[in-house]
Image (cartoon, rainbow, N blue to C red):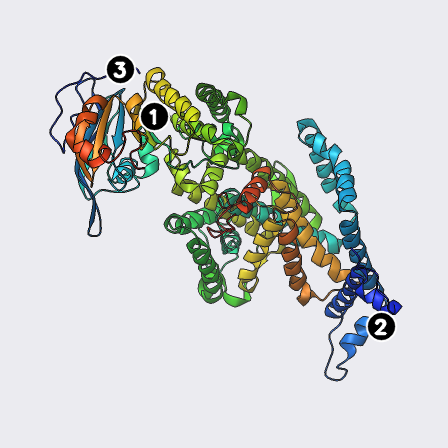
Amino acid sequence: MSQVSAPGPSPAPGEDAGGDEGDVVISVDAVTLRFGGLTSLSAVSLSQRRGQILAVIGPNGAGKTSLFNCLTGVYTPQEGSITFLDRSGKSTSIVGRKPHRVNRAGIARTFQTSRLFNALTAFENVKIGVESRMHTGPLGAMLRLPRTRREDRASDARATELLDFVGLRNRANDIASALPYGDRRRLEIARALGTAPEVLLLDEPAAGTNPSEKAELAALIRKVNSQMGVSVLLIEHDMGLVMALADRIVVLNFGQVIASGTPAAVQQDPAVVEAYLGAADPDEPGA
Amino acid sequence: MTAAPRRGSALRRLWTSEDARRGFACVVGGLVLAVMTGPEGSSTAPTSGFTGSLFHARVIGFIVFGLVLWGLITVRRRYATQVRAFSDKVTAAPRRLLPDKRVRAVVYLAVLAFAIAYPATLNSFWQEVLVDQIGVYVLLAIGLNVVVGYAGLLDLGYIAFFAIGAYSAAYWTGALPIHPPFHLNPFYAIPLAIIAAMLAGVVLGAPTLRLRGDYLAIVTLGFGEIIQIVATNLQGVTGGAQGVIGIPHFSIHLLGIHYDWGINSLPYYYLLLGFVVLVLFGFHFLENSRVGRAWVAIREDEVAAESSGINVLKYKVMAFAIGASTSGFAGMLEASKISFVEPADLTVQLSILILVLVIFGGMGSLPGAVVGAAVLQWLPQYLRVHPLLGFQQQDIYIYLGALLVVMMIFRPEGIIPSRRRKREIGLAEHGVGHADALSGQSGPVA
C-alpha cells in the first residue's frame, strides 16, 4: 500500500471529509438520486484524496451501484454536485456529463460483469482504450498521414506496456472471450488504464473470482495505486479484499452514508456492525 | 444412412432408401425450378408455361442440376470426414499463405491485372453490365459496408444518398430546371456531390443515431421514401417523374489534352476502377485505424466503448456520413455515365439489394463487399441472357432471396468474411454478445 491514512476522528455520519492527507480528487456533495418515488441516494457526501484507495461498501440495495453510476455519468442525480479535480487543479463537474466525457476528464471504470470487446484480442482491447486519447480522424486514417502512423506506433507501445503491467503480455494475441476469468478482469483494468485516468473506479472487481485470482487482483490494484499513482475507488462486497486494500472506507446503507474512516475504525463502528457486519461473520457479509 | 433391408418389392426397397428419396426430391426440385424459370403461360395456351419448360432442351440442365445437388448432398453425408479432410487439404495452402502480406499483394495485383485486361475483350453488352450493374454497385456496397459492416448500423435508405449525389451532379452541370451560379465539368462536381451526400448523412444521422436499435432502420427507410417522393413531385426543381436528361459525360480539357468519356462503357469502367481502387485503399486503412477500431468497439459493446472514452454518437455519425458520401459519389458517377436520373429507379428495393450484396459478401469485409456485389450483380444478368437457362428478368429476385436464405443457413458470415465478424457471429451463437445491430439483442442464448 502506498500510504495509509492516519486514524483520525471519525466524521459525523452522512458526511465524509476523506481523511486529511493530500488534495481532494473526487468530491461528492449532497447527492440525491431518485427513481420516481424511490430515493436511491439521499444527500450522500464523500470525498476522495489523491492517491488514496477508497472503498464504498454496504449491503445489497444500499445504493453502491447507483453512486457508481452517478460517478461515471450513467445516471444524473437530481440534487447535489460531483466534482473532479485533476492534477493541474482544474475542476470538472461530473453531473450531467456523458460517460465518454467523464472518461475524458480522467475517471476510468470497470464493470461488475466484465464487458470486454469479446471478438478482439487482448492487445486490441487495450489499444482501443489507449487510442481514445489520440486524435486521428477519418481523413488522416484513410490517407495514412504521418501523424496517424506516429499515433499508431505510440498506442502500440503503450498497449504493450500496459499488458505487461497487468501481467498479460504473453496473452496479447489471445481473443478476449477465450481468456480465463481472472485474466479478463485484469484485461479490463488494463483497458481502463489505457485511457490514462487519474481515478480508477472498480465495480466489484473480485466478484466471481477464486481465492488465488482474488489475491492477484488485490496485488494488481495495489500496484496500480502505488506505481501509477492512480487513485482507486472501489465498490466491493468482499470484506477481506476491502479490509486488505482500502485506505479509507465509506459505508452506505439505505442510500445514506452511515460511517466512514479507516478500515479499523469502520469495523468498530456500531452503526456499521448493526447495518452490515452484525448479522454475520465479517468475511461473509451475506452477499 | 440406408434403411434396414426389408423384404418386399424392389420399388419399395428403393422408396425406403433415404438416398433414393433424397435424389427424387432433388430431381423434382430441379423440374420445379425449370417450370418457375421457364416461359409464362398465356390465356390462349394456358399450359404453355409447363410444356415450354418441360419439353425444352433446358430441362436437361435442371435435371442435371438436381442430380449434381443430390450427389453433393450424398457425398457430404456419407463421407463427411473424408470431405472435411479433403477440403482442409485443398485450403491448407491458401490458409497458410494468405496471411503473408507479399502473397496477398500478389493476389491483389493479379486480380487488378485481370480487372484491367479482361473487360476489353468483352462485347458492349457485358461492358455496360460491368459499369452500370457491377462497378457502381461495388462502390455502393463498399460504402454501405462502412455503415453496416464496420459500425453495425442498419441503413435501409442508402439509395437516398445515391439520389442526392446524382441530383447534385445534375444541378452543378446545369441539367436541372434550376440553374447553379456557374456550370461545372462533371469532374469538378464530384467533390460537391460527395459533400452534399455527406451533409445529408450528417443531418439525418445526428438526431437519429442517438436512438438505439431498430429506430435507425425505420428512419432511414422513411428517408429513402421521402427522397424518392420529393424527386418525383418537386417538378420545378428536379424535373419531376420523367427525370432529368442531359447530364454531361466526363471530359478532360487540360493542358492541351482533350478527352471525352462519351457513350461507350469501357472508358467509364476504367474511371470507375480507378476510383474504386482508391476508395478501397482508403477504407482498408480506415478499418485498421483508430477510427475503425472505435467502430468495432461500439459494435461489440456500446456501453464499454463509451466508458473507454469513445464518443459513440460522433463515430456513428462519422460512419453514416462516410457511407452516405460513397453512395453520393456512386450516384454522381452513374448520373454522368448514363446522363440521366429518374426517380422511379431510386426505390427502397435498391437500398435492400445493396444491403443484400454486403451481407452476401461478408459484412465488415472489403474483399467480401467487392466479390459479393460483383457476383450477385453478375449472376442475374448471366442467368437472364444464358441461351439455355434464360431466366425471366422479373423472377430474378426470387432466386436471390432463396440464395440469401441458403447462405444464411450454411454460411451466415458471408462469402469472404472478416476475421472479426466471423468471431463475433461464433460468439453470438454461443450467447456471448450480439454480432451487430442487425441481429439485435434477441440472439440465441446458450
x and y, in percent, of residue B315 in the image = 43, 40
Residue at 47 percent of width and 41 percent of height: B300
Question: Extreme right residue here?
Answer: B10
Looking at the rendered structure, the secondary structure element under dot 3 is loop
Looking at the rendered structure, the secondary structure element under dot 2 is loop
x and y, in percent, of residue A136 in the image = 45, 30
Looking at the rendered structure, the secondary structure element under dot 1 is loop
Residue type pointed to by label 1: Pro
Measured in 3D between alpha carbons, the distance from the residue under mark 1 to the one under mark 2, in whole angstroms, is 77 Å
For residue A3, the mark is 3
Q: Residues within 10 Å of mark 1 (few under 14, many from 20)?
A: many
Q: Are marks 3 and 1 in contact (CB under 8 Å)?
A: no
Residue at 57 percent of width and 55 percent of height: B247
x and y, in percent, of residue B108 in the image = 69, 35
Quadrant in the rendering for residue B18: bottom right
Which chain letter goes with mark 1? A
Q: Are marks 1 and 2 on the same chain?
A: no
What residue did someone put label 1 on? A197
Which chain letter goes with mark 2? B
Q: Are marks 3 and 2 in contact (CB under 8 Å)?
A: no
Residue at 55 percent of width and 52 percent of height: B331
What residue did someone put label 2 on? B55
Q: Nearer the viewer, mark 3 or mark 1?
A: 3
Q: Are marks 3 and 2 on the same chain?
A: no
Residue type pointed to by label 2: Phe
Question: Is residue B163 something that shows in the picture?
Answer: yes
Residue at 39 percent of width and 40 percent of height: B303
Which chain letter goes with mark 3? A
Residue type pointed to by label 3: Gln
